[in-house]
Image (spheres, coloured by chain):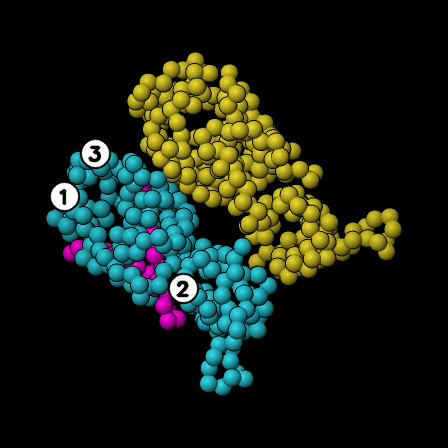
Chain colours: A yellow, B cyan
Amino acid sequence: MNRTHDSKGYWDSNIKLLPGISIDCAIFGFNDSQLKILLLKYKNTDCFALPGGFINEDENLGEAAERILTERTGLKNIYLEQFYAFGDKDRRNDATHHKLMAGNGIELKPDHYLLNRFVSIGYYALIDFSKATPTPDQYADSCEWYDLHSVPALIFDHNEILQKALYTLRHSIDEKLAGLNLLPEKFTMNEFQNLYETILGEKLARSNFQRKMLSLNILKRLDKKITGGAHKAPYLYSFDIK
Amino acid sequence: MNRTHDSKGYWDSNIKLLPGISIDCAIFGFNDSQLKILLLKYKNTDCFALPGGFINEDENLGEAAERILTERTGLKNIYLEQFYAFGDKDRRNDATHHKLMAGNGIELKPDHYLLNRFVSIGYYALIDFSKATPTPDQYADSCEWYDLHSVPALIFDHNEILQKALYTLRHSIDEKLAGLNLLPEKFTMNEFQNLYETILGEKLARSNFQRKMLSLNILKRLDKKITGGAHKAPYLYSFDIK
């Protein structure tokens, strides 16, 4: 995909974009006790950003978010959750836009689409990062996973968007985890607790965790996991959602 | 306020509005075991709607929502929570817009601002309805509280917006209630439970409720309430939020 836009906000002269609305995606990646975030780096700059984009006139808002997620990760049918609309009037600034496009050899005219005020709708996703194929957009030369503890300064209000996404993810974890396919079909309580601890960024007491999870009525207890020492074998669980 | 708009989306020729973005407000009212919703009825029509409006170019998104809430209720500094952006491409329809404006004696030209596609940002508020002064906007002839059990058919996707607001309110009740000033400074566990039951629309077991609320660490137990029969006097509580 190699689109160009003119000052009226058309791409390829064919696709019309909604004016003044953008999408930013906080794409979290989980695997092996690590939680990461997918970031773009704009060409020939030191500017990092969350992946994002605009809404075609013939797309629903959610469809546009899914398209952006698929373009950046190669994954389809991923669970994506809208979490907030960022609409402060000063959330973007022209100088950064000029810098980002200058790195691509593009000079923005004063009436360019990108220089309008935008309200950005935030979406987050949580995926197994080992299954994704990070792919930069046309203005970026890298699209990579960053550890949440070493996120660089991001453009505009993207650090704030990321923090709000992380907060939302952590506060909705009980309802959300079951649907995310981040565990094998059958898993032990230890594996489940490890997923929680990685996302929450803190250790949990084992007995409390087990009691809380069982009380949520989202788990079905299966047979014991077959290991070497049978008397120590842990139970396996699967999700059991109504 | 008596604004008019022309086809370019200006009101009063002075105030410029953001293109393609609107706000819809689900304003819930609580008092005396009743939960209601504030609805407008458009002039000379049978069309009901959530209160809403647009965003001035010099307003933050949240400031616009606060302004709309104040205009419709007379209340300031009310807790307002953004909950979702509604962006399906077919969520509005031209025929309804023409009908709403025809009731006001206005004929919409095909390039009128209102006939653009809009993404609407939903906000909800929960207030004591006895303190509000419902005030119609310029296109409505009534602005009234409706019992949640007898909400009429609303225009566009406003019934869906209302349901999503109610869902969000009910799922965030634990975190939110303390800040909403819907109880006196000191209250009994019975009063607190009554507020919960009214919002949730269901009865709760008294002992479970008390146990859960005390475990949330948001309540401070005070002296007993002074009543006639001292040995039956209930404890008073106040919120104790860190």
**Residue B196: x, y in percent?**
46, 66
Q: Is residue B37 magenta?
A: yes
The prevailing secondary structure element of the residues shown in magenta is strand
- Given residues B182 and A133, the one toward you in this image is B182
- Do the dots labelled 2 and 3 sit on one chain? yes
Secondary element type, mark 2: loop
- At a point 39% along the width and 44% down the height, the residue shown is B85
**Residue B74: x, y in percent?**
27, 56
Q: Residue furthest right?
A: A229
**Residue B112: x, y in percent?**
20, 37
Q: Numbered disc 1: what chain?
A: B
- The CA distance from mark 2 to mark 1 is 43 Å
Kind of residue indicated by mark 2: Leu
Secondary element type, mark 3: loop
Task: From the image, tell me which residue sits under label 3.
Answer: B8
- The CA distance from mark 1 to mark 3 is 15 Å
Mark toward the start of the polypeptide (2 vs 1): 1
Which residues are the magenta region? B21-48
Quarter-of-image position of residue B128: bottom left
Kind of residue indicated by mark 1: Glu
Q: Is residue B120 magenta?
A: no
Closer to us: mark 1 or mark 3? 3
- Asked if the residue at tag 3 contacts the one at tag 1, i.e. Cβ–Cβ closer than 8 Å, the answer is no
Task: From the image, tell me which residue sits under label 2.
Answer: B182
- At a point 63% along the width and 38% down the height, the residue shown is A35
Mark toward the start of the polypeptide (1 vs 3): 3
Mark toward the start of the polypeptide (2 vs 3): 3
A191 lies left or right of B79: right
Q: Is residue B219 visible?
A: yes
Q: Residue furthest left?
A: B105
Closer to us: mark 2 or mark 3? 2
Task: From the image, tell me which residue sits under label 1.
Answer: B107
